[in-house]
Structures are given as C-alpha cells and as structure tokens.
Image: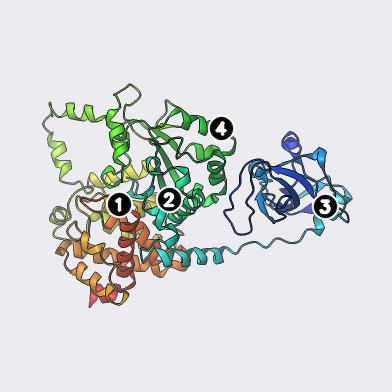
Amino acid sequence: MAVALTEDMAALIPSEEEEDDVVEVETAELKGSATADYIPVEEGELAVEKGEVLYILEQTLDGTTFVVRSEASGKEGKIPIDYIDIDASDIELPPNKPPTSSLRRRPAFMRSKHGSGTGRPRVFHVTPDDAKFLTSLPAVPHANVDDKEEEREERRSKTLNVGQVPDEFKLIEKYSIVSIGGTDRDGRPVIVFSMCRLPPSYQINHQRLYEYLIFTLDRYVEQDYTLLYFHHGFKTENKPSLSWMLQVYRQLDRKYKKNLKKWYIVHPTNFVRVMMWLFKPVISYKFGKKVAYINRLSELEPVLYLDQIDIPQEVLRYDKSLKPSSSSTGTATTSTSSSSSSYSSAPSLEAKSKSTFHMPMPSKEEIARADKVQFGVSLDILRQRNNDDPIPKVMKTCVTFLRSHGLDVLGIFRRTPSTLTVQQLKEQFNRGEDVMFSEHNDPHLAAVLMKLFLRELPEPLMTFDAYSEIVSVKGTPPEGRMEKCRAIVHSLPKTNYGVLKYLISFVTEVVAMREANKMSAVNMAIVLGPNLVWSQREVASLSSMGDINTLVVVLIENYEQIFTK
C-alpha cells in the first residue's frame, strides 16, 4: 500500500541508509526512565530526576518531545525525547490501548540532518496498520510567523525602550555574570559571560540564570551577535551540571545559534576542550566553526574594543600572570584546528612596544593617503576636507545607496556580510576612491560600513560630554523625556548635530518600512545605540545599553519635534 506523506510525516520514517541509526518506538504506552535531571524551560513540561520511571503517553508529530506520566508523582507533562531511555524488554500495555505500530522514529537531533531536498511529498511503502495510524494523527497547528514576530516585538518594546530589567532577574543581574560589551569591529553586539562571577551552585538558581541569558539574548538575537566567554574562575563550587549545560544548548532556539557569528572562549582549559569533544555529536559542524579559543586578552584586540568590555579584575590578573609562550602569538584558534586562525594575526603587546623604537619616516605616498582617510578621523577634520560639508562622504554614500536599494530589505542593519569585503570597501574609502555598492548587490554592506564608520570615530557622535545626561534619560518621567532629549541634541557641537540630524532623518525612513524590513524604532535603537554613544571611562552594561536604547527610540519617534521645531 503506497501512501503519500507530507514532510512532517516523512520525517518520522528513516530512509534506507538511516536504518542503523534508528530506534524503534511503539505508539502504545511505553515504560522508560529519565537519563538525566530535567528542569522545565517551557510551559507544560515536567521536571524529572535521573532514573525516575516514566510512562510515555504520546509523541509530538515533529518527533522532538514525549508526553509522559511520572510513576512516582502521577503528574503528566512534556519532556525532550533525548532525556528518556526506553526499555523495549519491559513494555507494560495498559488495557484498552490501540494496537502497537512498527513505525520507527529517529531522535530529533539525528533526523534534522536529513530531508528529501525536493520540496515535494515523499512516497513510502508502509503497512496498512502504519497507514491507518498516520492518517489518524491529529493535525499539529503551525505557529504563525507574524504572530511570533508581534509577540517578540511587544516583549522588546516593554523592556528595551525603557531600559528595565524584570524584577525576577534583579538578583542575578547584581552578579554581573552576563553583560554587554558594546560592539565588535564588525559592528555586532558583544554578549559577555564571566564564569568567575558565577556564585556557588547552592546560591543561584541555574534555571533562572538560563532565563536571564535568554532575556539578554532576546534583545539582540534578531541581529548577528558575538559571544565572549571568560572561562577563568570555573571551579567545582560554581560548576553547573553537565546535563544542565547540554540542556541549555538543546533548548536554545535555532535563531540564537544561527545569528551567533563568533564565540570566543578566553583562557580555555583542558576541561573546555573535553566538553567540546563530548558535545561534538550534538553540535553542528557550522556551529563548531564559530568557536575560537583565546589564550591571551591581547589576541582579542584585532576583533573587539577591549575598552568597552567589562573584563573582571580576576581575569585581568590571571592574564597578566601568564608567561609568554609560542602558542600566544596574538592569533585566535578555532575549535576545529589548533593551527588555523579566524582572523589575521595581531602583534603581542611586547612586540608593539618594541616596534616603537625604530619608527621609519612616512613616505610622501603615505602622507598623501593620510589626507584621504575617512575612518577613525574626527568629524571636524572630515568637514574641512569635504569643502565644509558636515556630512562625511562615507555616510552620504551609504545612505544614498540604502535609500534606493535597502529600505525594504528584511533585517537591514542587523546582518553582517563578508568581513573581507567590508574591509576591502573600507580601504577603498580610505584611499579616497569612489565606492560603488551596486557592483556588490548587497545592501547589508552599506549598512555595516555606516555603523563601522560611526563606531570608529575618535569621539562618539553624541560626544563623551553628553554621556551622563544620556544615561539619565530613563530616569526622567515619560512626559519629559522628549524635551530632555531635545536639550541634549541641541547642546551638541554644530557638526555633530548636523550629522545626527541627517542620520536620524534617514532612520525614520527605514522605520517607516518596518512592515517589510521588520526594523521598528526599538530594533533600530538596538543596532545603532552602541555606535552613537559610549563612555570614555565606563564599560558598557545591560543597564547603560537600556538607557542608550531609550534615548535613540525617543529621537526616532519624535524626529520632527526634536530636530525641526
């Protein structure tokens, strides 16, 4: 009997070449045991302890979850299939149950690697019993993408534009385990996790820590981001369980993993490498390529702005105590190869200091080139070079192209294109050449270069002097925030004011197309805020980033009142 199955149904049945990998699961109630402690992360899930006896009542159509009943408590709930060990030799069938099926289902983490690739329903030859069982399965409603986007947008609007942290996370926030490190040199926000600040396990709720991590990621997960993990301080007292770490990885939605572009593990130990090896079966190849081991803090200088990162004093002292070695040559090492590097080698601090003793005189070509450099140059100097036009060439070129080719692009300003191409176009600007974005057919290049230009200004566009006033906007009553922001803007130097007005005017055009590009005022504040404001003396934090986001949202939503009246 031939039955046409949809992709969802076909995913439940292995192909011939997958025969060795499958496990047989019967549709009648099965008896199994929990392979590890499981802490619920979603509504409707069941907390279980390792070894707890469970009855399997049903399996979701996507094959990732079982609905189970605990023999000890009698409670029912969902649990990922990987946390249950089914003993096929000890099946107890309750009365009045339907006949068992020979349908074989693969674990989700295996099955997800396969598919038909044709986009058409696949045809399988199954037994009549299997066909009857499949056609009797209830339809599983698919989540509406627009509804999910609206839910995320509502959650971000409640937290980001007011810079608040929910009360349930206040206790965890005080430890500063998770922080924001501004942006990396490709314009991506940096999420920092400091292991030395994690208190002993008995003092912190790891489930709440997981929720706080998700809360932090939700602020930036819709755009590309970088994760920085300081491993020093990892001790027996504060070490999370292996099952918890594996659970965190498995429970993270695909969007969190997809938009993570680089994960720097600083001061790795053998334990870290062993864990990466143990998790290798469940970590995708693409995700593994994003991991880079960092032996010394100086190796981060080519890719991160270290002055904007909240580096714990304990980590700084440990890094200073390390002896120079041949392995610490200023190169980040990927997890897949100890000899490969993810970016160009950076000279060590010792090498930098030695190179200053015999500095050669610049050539005429170098002097001439310096007069054309656009990145890392103050706005006043660029204005002088640009016939008193306050709008820098880089910004005008990027905005002109984006107005005609980028306003309706989904996730514009969120995505980071090829780093090599970005650097090549940056060099073109610095040589005084005209950059033709149309030759590359990628609006994200223009968006990233504009953010990079703003981030590399010697002083932020909204100036160091205005920082204290900016971070106080959140504490101003809502009805007075617009006037406060207006006062801050009009206190800026003339050139800075002109550039900011030009920029925010363009941003309002981007936000006006939010139905197509999904870039609301809140989303634009997240991507632009770290490039407009940073402190000369303080490192970025969740609280300060919330303050900055609040200001930028007010500027965007009240452009006419702030800039034109």
Give the residue pinned by disc 1: 540
The x, y position of residue 152, in whole percent, is: 49, 63
> Counting other residues with Cα less than 10 Å from the Cα at mark 4, is it few (<14), some (14-19), or many (20 or more)?
few
Give the foreground label among 2 and 4. Answer: 4
Left or right? Give the position of 122 relative to 195.
Answer: right
> Residue at position x 78%, y 58% from top?
137
Query: Along the polypeptide, which appears first: circle 2 or circle 3?
Result: 3
* Residue 440 image offset from top left, x and y in percent: 40, 49
> How far separated are the C-alphas under marks 2 and 3?
42 Å
Q: Nearer the viewer, residue 351 or 321?
A: 321
Instruction: Kindly identify the amino acid type of the residue bearing the numbered disc 2.
Output: Asp
Of marks 1 and 3, which one's residue comes earlier in the chain?
Answer: 3
Estimate the spatial distance between the alpha carbons at disc 4 and disc 1, rounded to whole Å: 34 Å
The alpha-carbon separation of the residues under discs 2 and 4 comes to 27 Å
Question: Mark 4 or 3 closer to N-term?
Answer: 3
**Which residue was labeled with disc 2?**
224
- Residue type indicated by callout 3: Val
Q: Which residue is mark 3?
A: 3
